[in-house]
Image: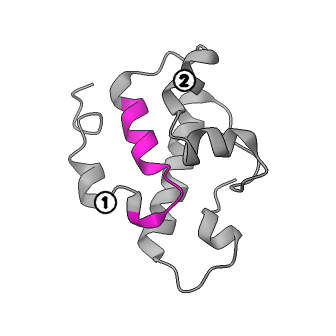
Amino acid sequence: QYMSPEIYRSRKPFDGHAVDLWAVSVILFMMVTGFPPWDRPCGTDIRYVYICRRGRLEEFCASWNLGLSPQLIDLLQRMLRERPIDRLSLEQIRTHPWIRGEG
């Protein structure tokens, strides 16, 4: 569940920082919701597809009545992108409004 899609698919080389931040985003999701976002980070898991490929975390959260703030949803969505190049960097995470207590 914490494994990034590129590790799950055994793609080499990979960006270790992006892989670690992926795990952080999954852990953060579990901390604020109480359950994992998906079973496996792959195209056969509909929740993974819905969140990471289609970018519909906000709709997912609304349908499950999770009550997460818009800033937190934005942070998670931007961290949970399938392609490592599209994910937030550590610096971007550190300056995100939710991390700074602004949402």
Residues packed near mark 2 inside 10 Å, few (<14), some (14 to 19) or many (20 plus): few
Residue closer to the observer: 80 or 35:
80
Residue visible at 59% across and 13% down?
65
Q: Count all numbered tags in the image, as a single digit.
A: 2
- Residue depicted at 69% across the width and 38% down the height: 47
Classify residue 76 by image quadrant: top left
Residue under label 2: 59
| Vertical order, 46 against 19 (above or below) | above
Q: Nearer the viewer, mark 1 or mark 2?
A: 2
Element at badge 2? helix
Q: Residue furthest front?
A: 54
Q: Which secondary structure type mostly characterizes the magenta part of the structure?
A: helix
Image height check: is 61 above or below 17?
above
Q: What's the residue at 79%, 51% (across, down)?
A: 44
What whole-number distance in Å separates the C-alpha atoms at marks 1 and 2? 26 Å
Rendered position, 72 above or below 15: above
The percent coordinates of residue 78 (x first, y second) are 40, 46
Q: Are marks 1 and 2 in contact (CB under 8 Å)?
A: no
Q: Which residue is mark 1?
A: 90
Q: Is residue 30 magenta?
A: no
Q: Which mark is residue 70?
A: none
Disc nearer the start of the sequence (1/2): 2
The amino acid on which the numbered mark 1 sits, given as a three-letter code, is: Leu
Element at badge 1? helix
Which three-letter amino acid code belongs to the residue tagged 2? Glu
Residue 61 in the image: above or below residue 78: above
The residues colored magenta run 72-85
